[in-house]
Amino acid sequence: MRLIAERTGRHCLRLPSNRLGLYLALRHWCVPGQRLLMSPISADEILFLVLAAGLRPVIAPLSPRDGNIDVSRTDLSTVDAVLTTNLYGLPDQVSAFAGKILIEDVAHALESSAGGRPLGTFGQAGVFSLSKHPGAGSGGVLAVADRADLQALEHARDELLVPGGLRADLVSVATSMARQAALRLDLVRPALALMRALGMQEEREGYRIALEADALELALKQVPALPPFDPWVRADLAAYRARRGRLVRWYQSRRLAKVPGERARRLAGVARLAELPTVAPAVPDNLDQPLFRVPLLVRDRDAAIAELERRGVATGYLYDPPYDDYAPGFTDASPDPGPARWWARHVLPVDPVYAARSLPVLRGLEPPTRGPREPAEGTPAGR
């Protein structure tokens, strides 16, 4: 955790996952019943964490420039708190949320900054992931300014932790090491084939986990409480609130320590991908940010993913459909859902560290034929 503590100048709490940290922060600073502004484009489990905390998700308009909250079209007077996403490492407009309870999800933005100041230092809490930039497979860090908050959050964390075990720790570390080896040795394609053959990939409905609305309604009757939401929140990380032993903590620290050494390679990849005509408009303005992924906006995203996989390049971190369409009835819908639907349909996130492997495919991709506020063919107006 030292790297994050030094970068943020904040007190840091080690966690088994970023998602547990987000829940702890929401419960600590927010009151059940409050309205929380959040992006329509984020991971499935984040929505369920907000619901588990007893908060009402208010879905913000999305900016097609960067896939984050469009502050210019948001009425902040109607919400009590804000949860940023910093999608793929592109910074949210954090300074615009002054005066609100602000929880920063910096899972994608470990090394990103806004106005020269590190993300994760603007709000009451910044919640980092050790499975994204560091590639540790699990782990999170909650960074706060006040030691009293740290102590209260540590107590709340310990009440939610469940027992782990050496075997689970060994599997976690071995799986992460295998994934890193597959990336380095360009063995992603056979690794994906093996995982599918062994049934190791999580079942999803498209790019989202099954909502199971009736079961979710029953869980909502128990808020604020996290355990009833385990079936949704654990998603692809079953041990998201399991205690971790020395082996995992050592491995996470080792992976985190490697992040600064990868910065130059990541920045070089961002610069190369920023030259593509399909790159999201905000990327060329953020060439100094070592992004977790570089978002491209392409005409046929799913065909591009299939072609990349054939060449041994895996993609992921797709949040399609946006929350408005994924969980209607559980959120206050965005006043303008069109741009989020367009972004979710067309975005292709690319790892800048391995940009060279992707470029032979990416150079042949075309941008969408319609803009973010033009309905696609066959889509009824207003949908």
Image (cartoon, rainbow, N blue to C red):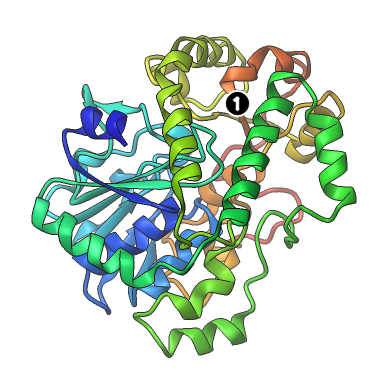
Which quadrant holds the C terminus?
bottom right
The spot of residue 249 in percent (x, y) is 43, 42
The spot of residue 110 in percent (x, y) is 38, 32
The spot of residue 308 in percent (x, y) is 79, 28
Q: In front: 170, or 335?
A: 170
> Taking 134 as reference, is 380 left or right?
right
Q: In front: 187, or 26?
A: 187
Which residue type carries mark 1?
Asp
Residue at x 84%, y 23% (from the top left corner) = 311
Which residue lies under the disc numbered 1?
Answer: 351
Residue at x 32%, y 37% (from the top left corner) = 1
Q: How busy is the neighbourhood of tag 1: few (under 14 within 10 Å), some, or many (20 plus)?
A: many
Residue at x 55%, y 81% (from the top left corner) = 216
- Quarter where residue 2 is shown: top left
Q: Is residue 79 visible?
A: no
Q: In front: 191, or 347?
A: 191
